[in-house]
Amino acid sequence: MTAFSHAPVLLEPTLALLALAPGMTAVDCTVGGGGHARRILEAILPGGRLIGIDQDQRALAAAEDALRPVGAGHYRLVYSNFARLRAILRENDCPPPQAILLDLGVSAYQLTEGGRGFSYQQEGPLDMRMDPGRQEITAAALVNQGTERDLAGIFWRYGEERWSERIAQFIGAERKKAPIETTSQLTTVIKKAIPAGARATGHHPAKRVFQALRIAVNGEVELLEQALRDAAAALAVDGRLAVITFHSLEDRIVKKTFQSLATGCICPKDLPACVCGRRPVGRILTPKPIVPDEAETRANPRSRSGKLRGFRKTAGENQDGR
């Protein structure tokens, strides 16, 4: 079995953006193997407290190994989805945190562990569930049971795959012969569907489809905006939220949500006074996303698509109380 590993992307910029200091309470909503979390815990000790959340039990075991030598008793690892952030803070009697991180990337372990089905480069069952113990719907279920129209929509919306309709049609034809159950079977169908000229340039032909299926299986996009609003609401005043994304759809959601949270009055300009009562929750710290430098992309090619955005809370609850 592959050892859990995940090189933390944009580590130093993230730590700087969070403005960590001893005594702080911090939350890593996607703790993974503990790469970011270890450095966060080091920065908030003595006196600080870290809550680490992940829906992958192997990730939590790896995070425990990473964090225990740094500060046993100063962290709590929670097996859950970050969509439950506010409930998790209540359940753990956690004061409003001064720093929250969401790293939305897939770990190297998840990509290279064939049994998880995340990678088109590893043979394995077409699974892609982040939390196999609690999730029922697999990528194989979507591929074999979804209509061609639904599959094309998934591939376009979540993967921006230009050949989405053609790939869905090829999948429909192939599954009539036999179910598509493995990563290699799906990859073969995708390669057949995409014209040779298009396959000869750019990324691996299966990359966008595998990304789209992973997002659909785990409901990643549907959870993200509300999770960001919950995180902003949970923060202490002057607390900071950092989010690392790895594809354009997620980055757009983060950008637009931060813009919404930073927007005050929306009354028509011809009104003599504000009647909407809306006020900004905070301000955006990154007018443009921070991206990895050349040294990081050389050392970790998977970091190339990473983007970091930050937000600082300056007010109380969100505009509409969400």
Image: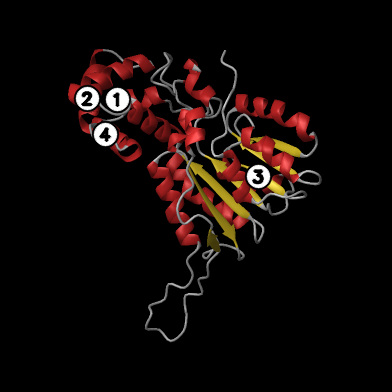
Instruction: Indicate the amino acid at tag 2.
Output: Ile
188 displayed left or right of 102: left
Nearer mark to the viewer, of 4 and 2: 2
Quarter holding residue 64: top right
Q: Using the image, tell me which numbered label, if any, was put on residue 27.
A: 3
- Left or right of 179 in this view: 101: right
Q: Of the numbered discs in the image, which one, if any, rests on residue 205?
A: 1
- x, y percentage for residue 174? 24, 17
Which of the marked residues, 3 or 1, is nearer the chain's N terminus? Answer: 3
Check disc 1 and report its element: helix, strand or loop: loop
Name the residue at 63% across, 32% down.
35
Q: Residue furthest bottom?
A: 272
In primary-sequence order, the first of circles 2 and 3 is 3
Say what secondary structure mark 2 lies in: loop
What type is the residue that disc 1 sits on? Pro
Which residue occupies 48% across, 56% down? 258
Q: State which quarter of the image contains the N terminus.
A: top right
Disc with the residue nearer the chain's start (1 vs 2):
2
- Is residue 172 something one can see in this rendering? no
Measure the C-alpha gap from mark 3 to mark 1.
Answer: 36 Å
Mark 1 touches mark 2? (CB < 8 Å): yes
Q: Residue 235: x and y, percent?
A: 63, 55
Q: Which mark is residue 194?
A: 2
Left or right: 290, with 28 as reference point: left
- List the residue tagged with mark 4: 152
Camera-nearest residue between 296 and 235 = 296
Crowd around label 4: few <14 · some 14–19 · many ≥20 (10 Å) = many
What's under tag 4, amino acid-wise? Ala
In the picture, which quadrant includes the C terminus?
Answer: bottom right
